[in-house]
Image (tube, rainbow, N blue to C red):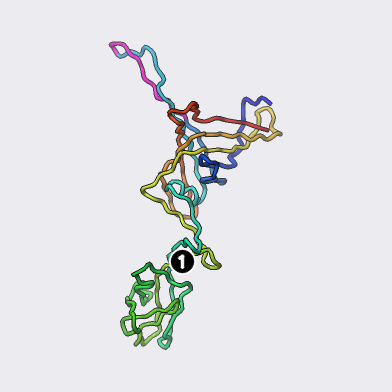
Amino acid sequence: MNINTFVINKPLSGSMLKSDGDIIFRIMDFKDPKLTVSTETEDAVDALGTPIMQFDRSKKVDFSATKANLDLSLVAARGGNAKRAGTIGAPVYVPKWETFENVASTTTTITLAKTPYAAAGLDPVPYIWETTDANPVGTRYALSDTTASATTFTISAKTITLPTGRSATSNFLVYYEYAGTGATGLSAVEVDYAVDRYPTAGKFVLEVLGHDICDPLTEYVAWIVMPYAKLNCDIDLTLNATTTDDFKLTAMPPYCGSSRTGFKIVIAE
């Protein structure tokens, strides 16, 4: 085997690894992978500015691609964190809106789908709103520690006792947070993009499928490896059905290391 000209079919995967071999993120569905090498040069000129010769000073290696859809692990890596699933000991706190429509004036309570959570010293549901078609945020009612009144409501676990004195059928809007613990009906994952944490350098491995130019019947896999790469923190997402996520890595070989490899290409049968 002595491939020289390689015809690329498509990328298969891209993986970022920690120094201990653990996976930071792994993406499968992406397009337009691009490897860019730029060189900084310095010209020697004469007194009139005529170039005499040119000296190479530095090289920069970048890899960029576009991820289809929203990849939570990729977002988390740029925020200096990992994607986290809620557990009983370390829940993910999930926001929730609930609407209750056509609540009869004779109905005294409504039951939430989840049990609201509140940190110490805070109310689990401080307010509820009575709404109409013309006013999506209508009359606001506050939580009472004692009993419901014409202007207040009470809550016990998931049950809200509604304000009294309503003379007509009503709609109610409730906002709260609940603890996603991983239990049935409470599963949740979280991505925390921290503004004071940044990705660390790791190994990036790109897997590409293709053919020798002279052998269209045999498939080969090419590996493009950046031994030390830094993930760019920038994110620019349009949140809709056609969401794509452009990401970029820059080679960062150890300045004092024995190897200053920016990238290498390996092709195997």
Q: Which amino acid does label 1 sit on?
A: Ala
Q: Which residue is drawn at 62% across and 37% down?
A: 209
How many marks the image carries: the answer is: 1
- From the viewer's perspective, is residue 158 above or below residue 184? below
- From the viewer's perspective, is residue 115 above or below residue 60? below
In the rendered image, residue 74, in percent from the top left (x then y), is placed at: 48, 47
Q: Which residue is drawn at 35% across and 84% down?
A: 147
**Residue of label 1:** 179
Looking at the image, can residue 13 be seen? Answer: yes
Considering every residue shown, the one lying at the far left of the view is 47
- From the viewer's perspective, is residue 79 above or below residue 147? above
In the rendered image, residue 125, in percent from the top left (x then y), is placed at: 38, 73
Please tell me whether residue 44 belongs to the stretch shown in magenta. Answer: yes
The magenta stretch spans which residues? 37-48
Relative depth, front residue between 201 and 128: 201
What is the chief secondary structure element of the magenta stretch? strand
Mark 1 secondary-structure assignment: strand
Residue 23: quadrant of the picture: top right
Quarter of the picture containing the N terminus is top right
Looking at the image, can residue 135 be seen? Answer: no
Q: Residue at x 66, y 24 (%)?
A: 2
In the rendered image, residue 220, in percent from the top left (x then y), is placed at: 66, 34
Local crowd size for mark 1, using a 10 Å CA cut-off: few (<14), some (14–19), many (≥20):
many
Q: Is residue 29 left or right of residue 245?
A: right
Quarter of the picture containing the C terminus is top right
Residue 51: quadrant of the picture: top left
Considering every residue shown, the one lying at the far right of the view is 217
Q: In this view, does 229 lie to the left or right of 132?
A: right
In the rendered image, residue 9, in percent from the top left (x then y), is placed at: 61, 37
Relative depth, front residue between 131 and 98: 98
Please tell me whether residue 263 belongs to the stretch shown in magenta. Answer: no
Q: Which residue is drawn at 63% across and 35% down?
A: 221
